[in-house]
Amino acid sequence: MSGAMESVSANLTEEEMGGLANYVSELSPCLIPDSVVDPGQGNISEGEVLANDKGCLGCHNFGNAKSYPSLAGQKAHYLNQQLLAFKSGTRKNNFMNAFASNLTESDILNLAAYFNSLGSCQK
């Protein structure tokens, strides 16, 4: 368990944890709204080609959600910010810093538009 979850769950009883687990297990991942990206900000088709060419889906898909975050349905603005942070080195991850360093701003907008367009319910 991560440090954040340890502090949140430290004072829960077994009964409360069971109730919370039951509640969360019944939530639908499809409650996230449909695409919120402005089509003028990025090109979904170009983003799809780039994501496939660069191998993004090798890590960032539903099947690898335990190891890497699934980016399907993620807000484009957030993805833009994070990829720019990886590119500039203000967000640290050796692999992502190297990967993002080769992306143009247009690439970043296109990737963000593509991942946002997937929706959270696609597999």
Image (spheres, grey):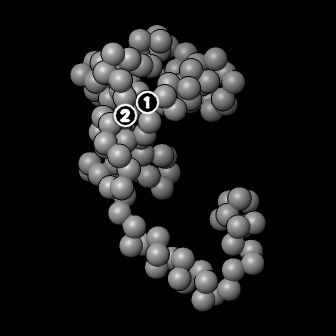
Residue that appears at 48% across and 46% down: 69
Farthest residue to the left: give it.
Answer: 45
Residue 71 to residue 17: above or below: above
Q: Residue 76 got which mark?
A: 1
Element type at mark 2: loop
Q: Position of residue 20 (x, y in %)?
A: 54, 77
Q: Position of residue 79 (x, y in %)?
A: 49, 30
Q: Residue 6 got which mark?
A: none
Is 66 left, or right, of 35 in this rendering? right
Residue that appears at 38% across and 50% down: 32
Is 94 left, or right, of 7 in this rendering? left
Residue type, mark 1 in image:
Ala
Farthest residue to the bottom: give it.
Answer: 15
Mark 1 surroundings: few (<14), some (14-19) or many (≥20) residues within 10 A? many
- The answer to whether the residue labelled 1 contacts the one labelled 2, judged by CB atoms less than 8 Å apart, is yes
30 or 59: which is nearer to us? 30
Residue 13 to residue 9: above or below: below
Residue that appears at 32% across and 55% down: 30
Residue type, mark 2 in image:
Val
Is 25 left, or right, of 114 in this rendering? right
Q: Quadrant of the N terminus?
A: bottom right
Residue that appears at 32% across and 37% down: 35
Q: Quadrant of residue 13?
A: bottom right
Q: Position of residue 6 (x, y in %)?
A: 72, 67
What residue does disc 2 label? 36
